[in-house]
Amino acid sequence: MDQDRDEYDTVVIGGGSGSQVATAAADRGLEAAVIEPGPLGGACITRGCVPSKALLHRADLADEVRRAGEFGVAADLKDVAYGEITDAIHDTVYEKAARQDRSLEENENVALYRGEGHFVDERTIAVEPTGDSGEGSEITGDAIILAVGSRPMVPPIDGLEDVDFRTSDDALYLEERPNELAIVGGGYIGAELGYFFGAVGTDVSMIGRSEQLIPGEDDDASAVVTDSLADYCELYTGYEAAEVSQNGDGGVTITAEPSDDDSGNGSDGDAVEIEADDLLLATGRRPNTDTLALEETDVETDDKGYVETDARLETTAEGIWALGDIVGEQPFKHAADYEAEIVMANVLDGAGREVDYGAMPHAIFTSPQVASVGRTESKLEDEGRDYEATTVPFDAAPLGLILGADDGFVKVLAAPDGEILGCHVVGPQASTLIQEVVVAMDRGDGTVDDVAEPVHVHPALSEAIYTAFDDLSSSEFSTAPDWRDVAPSGRGSGEE
């Protein structure tokens, strides 16, 4: 394709999940353009999901070594080759981004514009090049897809402008492990990074506004993760960072005061001062819509900057669509991919497909892992909805007992007629185990019997899922395992 062309059938602003819409259009023989200033693949590949989970895998390995004595295996963790780990992860994920870059460059029906895109009118986008990528351009598209993602939010903390700090974007590839790290933020990003740094030997202090970490999760899941993270970090839950300053040792001092969060669960204690070598902000993310000059269009956003769309993901401007983090519904890579599929169908086929997030799962890769789909118990109570609940510990399944997953559980929430309303899994492989529940909710009738009736492998961890759903099943007969009354014979004495 001639790069001087400025008219396309489809224009995508953002090289993450949205670029899949461009390649789908190109497969139809249409002319498409992708505008992206950074690595292809979006934040997930190079600055989020993948590199962070690669780090967390190393944390899991370190944790397994430390726990080996519980199972009668003598092992010592002598060292963590921190710089080698981060270098290897960096090289892997950026090679993937480079491969995606080459794939787009080689597609004769896709033009890749290296730069920042913003509107100059309803249908025209100006591209300001980055680096040495050439002169600026103006392009138009019959269909325009907004998929510019999000960036870390920097909260208004007194003194922050005079202090060096990191965000999740620049904390993943450090050359050396911090000795002391203060993390501001108790959501899933802060919890995952707190677990990682704590597991590899950093002294971590974590400040969270709510009394429990990951407060958006089911209350029981939040409680388990909070208790677990206390083994890796010094927790200051119910506090918020009020002031920061550089101290005489080159580090940072954080003054944290009791919070007054929306739930009323803030601490009623005194202010505390926390000293650390490094400061990491993990206080959420904000949509990049402020880079698009949307005031030049009829695209509307809410008070937080998220793009308003209808159920088909078309914005308030005809022919302009949105997906991913800027929609603000489900801030996950897999959700953005799902939304890209919806946009493909509607833009390329006029299918009129609508999004349905009812069976949209997510996971948090702490130790233990957390995975969830559907509503939480507190959400159902707020809605005044009738429901039944059961909670089964992981050690009901023999493999859960063998693995020593003492704090793991499966909670099932169902309507009186058996409809699955939510499921929350805490424990090893939770991110994988949740999937059969997702399939039941999305493809079957969505009842507890859809999960309880199929045969489950013995003695796999999926038997914990089976036992929980069997508790609420309408079946007269049951063969679900229950090993809760047995001593953990699959483990060692705990002595080395």
Image (tube, grey):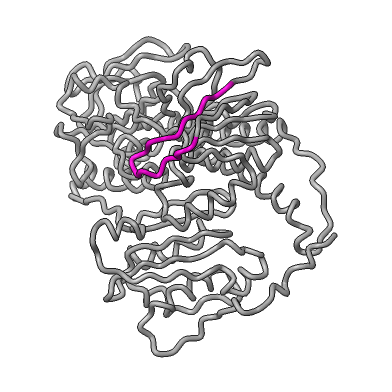
Part of the protein shown in magenta: 253-269
Q: How many marks?
A: 0
Q: Is residue 399 above or below residue 353?
A: below
Q: Nearer the viewer, residue 260 or 397?
A: 260
x and y percentages locating residue 112 in the rendered image: 39, 25
* Residue 420, position as x, y percentages in the image: 33, 68
Q: Determine if residue 36 is in view.
A: yes
- Where does residue 301 sit, x and y in percent of width and height? 22, 30
Q: Position of residue 328 (x, y in %)?
A: 31, 39
In the picture, the quarter occupied by the C terminus is bottom right
Above or below, comparing residue 218 to residue 177 in the picture: below
Depth check: give the residue in front, 34 or 245: 245
Q: Is residue 228 above or below residue 278?
A: below
- Looking at the image, which residue is at 51% across and 35% down? 207
Q: Spot the residue most to the bottom.
A: 476
Q: Left or right: 450 with respect to 211? A: left
Residue 62 inside the magenta-drawn segment? no
Using the image as rendered, state which of residue 142 and residue 71 is in the foreground. 71
Q: Quadrant of residue 219?
A: bottom left
Residue 102 at least partly seen:
no
Left/right placement of residue 10 relative to residue 37 reads left
